[in-house]
Image (tube, rainbow, N blue to C red):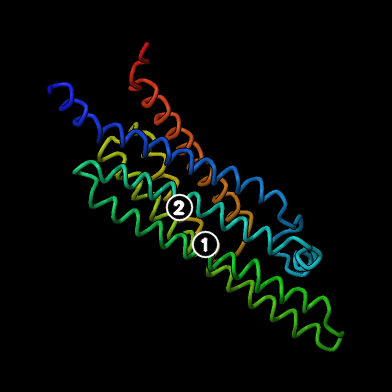
Amino acid sequence: METEQASRGDLPVARQRGLIWLAGLLLIGGEVAGAIVGSFHAGGAKANDHAAVFKQYAESDSWTVVHILLFMSALLIVAGVVVLARALAQIERGRNLAVLIAVAAAISAAASGLVLAVDGVALKQTVDAWVNAVPAQKAFAFHDAEVIRWLEWGANSFLATAEGLTYLLLGWGIVRTALVRKWIGGLSAVAGLGYFAVAFSVGQDGFSDTTSALGVTAGVLFVIASIAIAVVGWRERRSHAPPAVA
């Protein structure tokens, strides 16, 4: 009877460890998938050099497919955050924060879909129309493409804001509950602040070198946090695994 009660008492802890492990896998899986798919993204010219970069976009035959796959990889990351929020909800001090994190993650997913729809579909159509326009209509077609590009700036600014809020809340939740090592929560929070900086930069200057540097820095910090979450989840599962029965 005592053994059965102990097992029932350990069940929430075991479930929590499983959620941490799953969250780490989803986060890393989404980030790796995004990096692989992103390597096929057309470009090379300065992103704010619209004439040069629009020509490269128009020449891409896989543009829309790449952006759909990028959205799918972003959804994996969002799923990882939601699963981690579920693990936080197992702890009393993390329940309210878990709800806020899940809501922020859902907003991030919606914002990501908007960005990739504008970039992957609308912008592609307008740059193709510009390239194929007759000389008398080239200037008007180019202006249309730039309008879509500026809309993309705005959508990216709001996406970065949502991501920043998500990662900041996630970091706060980790530090508050000690679900995993507190320094991991600190990394997530700093990454969130970095995305806030990206939001202001892209909204003001578009895809400048400063925006790119801020985005890479914030992204790397969250990748490190994701790897750490997966490692902690894996170690805890192994250290608390039931002994093999002979």
* On screen, residue 91 above or below 163: above
Q: Residue furthest bottom?
A: 136
Numbered circle sitting on residue 19: none
Relative horizontal placement of residue 74, taking residue 245 as reference (left or right): right
Q: Residue at 62% of width from left, 61% of height from top?
A: 68
Q: Residue furthest top?
A: 246
Q: Residue at 31% of width from left, 40% of height from top?
A: 174
Task: Identify the mark nearer the N-term, 2 or 1.
Answer: 2
Q: Does the residue at mark 2 contact the one at mark 1 (Cβ under 8 Å)?
A: yes
In terms of depth relative to the viewer, which is nearer, 202 or 179? 179
Amino acid at dot 2? Val
Residue 186 % position (x, y): 37, 39
Give the quadrant of the C terminus. top left
Residue identified by numbered label 1: 112
What is the secondary structure assignment of the residue under circle 2? Answer: helix
Q: Residue furthest right?
A: 135
* On screen, residue 129 above or below 241: below
Numbered circle sitting on residue 78: 2
* On screen, residue 83 above or below 182: below
Q: Residue at 19% of width from left, 30% of height from top?
A: 9
Residue 72 % position (x, y): 56, 55
In terms of depth relative to the viewer, which is nearer, 117 or 192? 117
Q: Residue at 71% of width from left, 81% of height from top?
A: 143
What is the secondary structure assignment of the residue under circle 1? Answer: helix
Relative horizontal placement of residue 146, taking residue 246 as reference (left or right): right
